[in-house]
Amino acid sequence: MTVDADVLVVGGGPAGLATAIEARLRGLTVTIVEPRGGAIDKACGEGLMPGALPALARLGVDPPGFALRGVSYRSGTSRGAERRVDHLFSSGEGRGVRRTALHDALTERARSLGVVVVAGKVDALEQDAHSVTAAGIRARYLVAADGLHSTVRRLTGLERPVAARGRRYGVRRHYHAEPQSDLIEVYWTPTVEAYVTPVGGGVVGIAMLGRKGIDFDAALAGIRPLAALVAGAEPATELRGAGPFRQSTGRRSHGRVLLVGDASGYVDAITGEGIRVGLAQAEAAIASIARDDPKSYEKEWMRRTRDFRVLTAGLVAAANSPARGAIVPAASALPHVFGAVVDRLAR
Ligand SMILES: Cc1cc2nc3c(=O)[nH]c(=O)nc-3n(C[C@H](O)[C@H](O)[C@H](O)COP(=O)(O)OP(=O)(O)OC[C@H]3O[C@@H](n4cnc5c(N)ncnc54)[C@H](O)[C@@H]3O)c2cc1C
């Protein structure tokens, strides 16, 4: 059997590029199919949790950004006394990294290792006992990293329906402004959570998460410290949104097709760790391919995503419930619990 590559990666976002680098580090040949050119941008809070940095370093990637020492939850309304709780990461620093800078760093490393990137979009695939073919490329395995609205997930029947009730979305914009702190600040209002993440170079990203139809400017105006931060500051980017977040899968592989990153199922951006989890999934997927045992990926996927699935889903349930307003007061009353959860997710 002749194939064009050992691994065909669908999607050249962070999870796809990390998968391709992992494959090359194990001596496998790789082609990525990605429709978008240049430094790919995306709506994201851009906070890399401490656990993401050693995972990137293992791949030989060290993106530029702004060192982040922890997370600060704050009550975000203009009325009443501000409640807040800060926690410094116990496992080292995280980093605020512009998506375009992360993409450039991953792409440069992938290209230096001989990863082939082809412009194209996968809309169909075929597989037999020995290979998978998509976008005219035949490979021994296909890893789908095509994001929240994965086409491959749908084509392989791995997608599971998600209830429309409680759907959440995100929207972000950057500003030319000096950072106010080296913590990821999260302002909780009755309708949104607003994440402030410095990304270096005098640029600060603000991402808001909430129900459909987030009014970014109105929410910003209602959070006094953020209104002050952006007063007179030039926006550095346009508003960009994504969602709905919740995407579900029954299994993570189908024959020779494996799902990684948001394509493999996503809970929510509320705990800001999609990239860290995607890197862990990329490593596990390629390890199972290197063993020629794609079925073993499922167990590793379950293990490596457990905290994200359980803790993130729990926080989203609280955020969507009448107890929403009690989250910051409870976290500030129980700082050790808050710190333990942050550290658990930051690993
Ligand atoms: C508002 C918001 C805030 C967030 N904040 C954070 C945060 O602070 N920290 C964090 O770690 N994570 C955060 N996340 C999550 C993070 O952005 C995602 O988990 C991450 O982008 C997933 O990477 P990915 O490579 O799986 O998917 P993506 O980055 O979406 O990449 C998918 C790629 O696949 C390509 N593609 C799509 N369809 C096809 C096709 N049919 N054929 C070929 N290619 C295709 C796309 O062009 C894209 O380049 C946030 C997300 C949002 C929306």
Image (cartoon, helix red, strand yellow):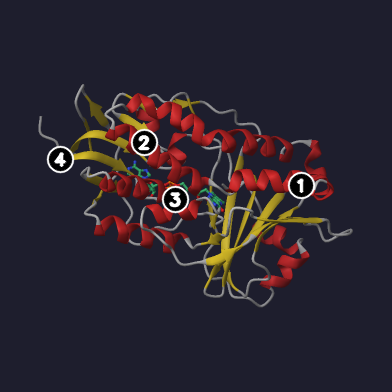
> Residue 202, image x and y in percent?
56, 75
Q: What distance separates the C-alpha of mark 4 from that of mark 1? A: 53 Å
On residue 4, the disc is: 4
Q: Which residue is mark 2?
A: 285
Which residue type carries mark 2?
A: Ala
Which residue occupies the extreme left position in the image? 2
The reply to whether discs 4 and 2 touch (Cβ–Cβ < 8 Å) is no
Marks 4, 2: nearer the viewer? 2
User: How many numbered marks are there?
Assistant: 4
Q: Regarding mark 4 in the picture, which secondary structure is present there?
A: loop
In the rendered view, tell whether residue 330 sits above or below residue 236: above
Horizontally, residue 1 falls left or right of residue 22, namely left
The furthest residue to the bottom: 232
Q: CA distance from mark 3 to mark 4?
A: 28 Å
3 or 2: tag closer to the N-terminus: 3
Q: Earlier in the sequence, mark 3 or mark 4?
A: 4
Q: CA distance from mark 4 to mark 2?
A: 20 Å
Q: Residue at x 28, y 35 (%)?
A: 290
